[in-house]
Amino acid sequence: MPRRRRADHEDDSPTPSKLPHPSEPPLDFTSPQSLFESLIAPMTCEEFFSSYWEKKPLLVQRSDPAIQSYYQSLFPMTDLKLASGKGIYFGRDVNMCKCKNGKKVLLPRRGKANYLEILKDFRASRATIQFHQPQRFNDKLWQIMEKLECFFGTLVGCNVYITPSSSQGLPPHHDDVEVFILQVEGQKRWRLYEPLVQLAREYDVSPADKVTTPTHEILLKEGDMLYFPRGTIHEAETPASTPHSTHVTISTYQNNSWVDYLQDVMPAVLEDAAKESVDLRKGIPRQQLLCLDPSRAGCTLSALLSDIGKRMEGRCQLRSCEMLRDFMGNRLPPYLDVDSSNQETSDAPPNLNSTIKLQYKDYAAITTDHVPEALKPSEELMIYVLHALKNERKTHMVSDNEESPPVSGLRFPLSYMDALKTLWEEKPVCVKDLPLENDRDKENLAISLWSEGLLETVPAEA
């Protein structure tokens, strides 16, 4: 989310690029950091985040044939044909849209999406194909995006836009995400405008009288990349000189601002602070909730928040209760290449004399939280080790279920924290040397993490 659907007409798809695909990808997948650096090269990460991130657009032009060929493999039109044979649906997987009189028009399509039907709308109605979360079908996008989720530490989404010649799919608008555009096929002419709302938190179509002179006019060619911050007003059209344009939009940092983080950590901070502060436990003034001017409590609230701020600067422990769980439960699992099945693994669980080492650190996190009341009513804090190793690639960012998926992980007593921190250093360590009081706990920790796929046993001399 593999039987390939037979096409009625083999010539319905645009002719794929004839550039040879390199045997080694031009992007560096050694680490999340190296992958991002190779995306923005020759610019450095330091320069990007100091001068461009959340500030202004960046254009990276690529004339290297290897880069162009690689980008052309990131869900070109031919991939749409393959995906349609696996069962895709209008609304969830694909939409047909066009810009008409400054407004977005969505073609009323429902049910299972047939490739020939999509192609008919694309050609006859001059509609843009908007394909959601193509990383579910394209392995290279999966590899890119799971590394970017490690790099940013938050969810990364993706859409593909395939637009006919002399056409525009969307009106001028701004998004609530940081956007990276990868030009896959053809060319696309972009116009960027000053934001009406800096770092906007909501998607919005910009009124025509507010969109005046572009700050940037850019022609993206195959292999080029364009970045712009959330809130940047933008529109794009396919020039008449190109048969069609395909670009991949990679987006991140939705609901990942300081206000979101504060909303996440403050309930736990207030709960902990109230245990120590009698001022927080005092009752609010009589009829405060009914008061026409509740701001009379402003001075008291300001003093209380000032005290909480001082606690947060000191020994207060911040606990992310929902954002971390949402990220871990919804993110992509690690990319598995063709060589993964050839890696040597030990079928035997570790014992006290085993040398172990953490693996998949980028896909796991340690946090503390209370035990859910439904399981065991208690105010005792526990350690949670959450991970994404069992997540489903086929449902990434498109789950039909409104409820968040369950998060894979384990729960340990607080006394295990030092041992977990030792393992998180990613250095080989003997199980019997873990900083825990008794051998039973040491072996329990090692076996538990090993059973989740987070530990590997290594030769003692490693």
Image (tube, rainbow, N blue to C red):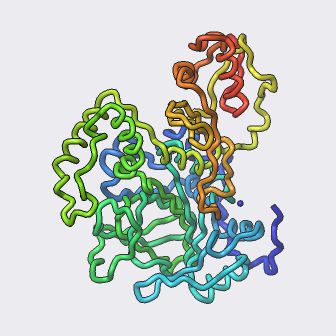
Q: Quadrant of residue 189?
A: bottom left
Q: Foreground: 114 or 300?
A: 300
Whether residue 106 appears in this view of the structure is yes
Residue 421 falls left or right of residue 202:
right
Q: How many marks?
A: 0
The residue furthest front is: 286
Residue 188 placement (x, y as % from top left): 48, 71
Whether residue 30 appears in this view of the structure is no
Q: Foreground: 250 or 326?
A: 326
Look at the picture and state if 208 lies above or below 228.
below
Residue 213 placement (x, y as % from top left): 27, 75
Residue 332 falls left or right of residue 187:
right
Q: Residue at x 67, y 85 (%)?
A: 120
Residue 451 placement (x, y as % from top left): 73, 30
Query: Which quadrant of the figure contains the C terminus?
Result: top right
Look at the picture and state if 147 lies above or below 131.
above
Residue 140 falls left or right of residue 318:
right
Query: Which quadrant of the figure contains the N terminus?
Result: bottom right
Q: Foreground: 236 or 204?
A: 204
Look at the picture and state if 155 lies above or below 226.
above
Residue 46 falls left or right of residue 98:
left
Q: Residue at x 79, y 34 (%)?
A: 342
Q: Foreground: 32 or 88?
A: 88
Look at the picture and state if 292 lies above or below 366.
below
Q: Residue at x 29, y 61 (%)?
A: 198
